[in-house]
Image (cartoon, rainbow, N blue to C red):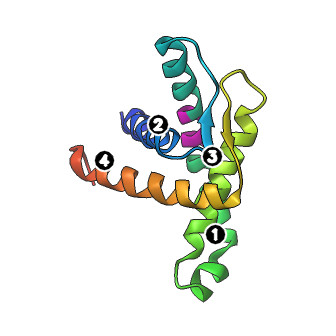
Amino acid sequence: MRFVIRLLVNAAAIWLCDWLFGGIALAPSSSTGQMILSLAVVALVFTLVNMLVKPVVKVLSLPFYIITLGLFFLVVNALMLLLTGWITSFTNFGLSVDGFGTAVVAGVVIAVVSWLLHLVIPGKR
């Protein structure tokens, strides 16, 4: 159940970034069903990247977190978003990110939206 909640929260955050920024775009779709499917695939890949790759990157980059007093999380979030875009570029349900700056800003928005939605959604903490 926790995985499904993470997936839905990430889907909402990615959709918001797609809506807010011109540099973040889901694969073009002709219908609402295709857009929802594309968003679901991208959210699934993003959730898996955050669950499997991000902890390893956080441990390996621990000195950078200490030196920058935690601001390195912006870079890690941007890299996870870029990795998601690269992985999904091989499918018809791709996410395109224009550059690192766009990925940093979108990573901040995704982190804030995820945090807010996790506060609102009831569950174990």
- Name the residue located 49 percent from the left edge and 45 percent from the top edge: 17
Give the alpha-carbon distance from disc 2 to disc 1, as whole Å: 29 Å
Where disc 2 sits, the SS reads: helix
- Secondary structure state at the residue bearing disc 1: helix
CA separation in Å, label 4 and label 1:
26 Å
Q: Earlier in the sequence, mark 2 or mark 1?
A: 2
Q: 28 or 52: which is nearer to us?
A: 28
Residue at 65% across, 80% down: 64
Crowd rating for badge 3 (residues with CA inside 10 Å; few <14, some 14–19, many 20+): some
Residue holding disc 4? 117
Residue flagged by tag 1: what amino acid is it?
A: Val
Nearer to me, 89 or 17: 17
Q: CA distance from mark 2 to mark 4?
A: 14 Å
Secondary structure, mark 3, is loop
Q: Which residue is mark 3?
A: 23
Q: Nearer the viewer, mark 2 or mark 4?
A: 2
Where is mark 1, residue-wise? 59
Q: Earlier in the sequence, mark 3 or mark 4?
A: 3
Q: Secondary structure at mark 4?
A: helix
* Residue at mark 3 to residue at mark 4: CA–CA distance: 24 Å
Question: Where is residue 108 shown, x and y percent of the image?
Answer: 49, 60
Q: Which residue is mark 2?
A: 15
Residue at mark 1 to residue at mark 3: CA–CA distance = 29 Å
What residue range appears in magenta?
43-49
Looking at the image, which residue sits at the far front?
22
Q: Nearer the viewer, mark 2 or mark 1?
A: 2
Q: Closer to the camera: disc 3 or disc 4?
A: 3
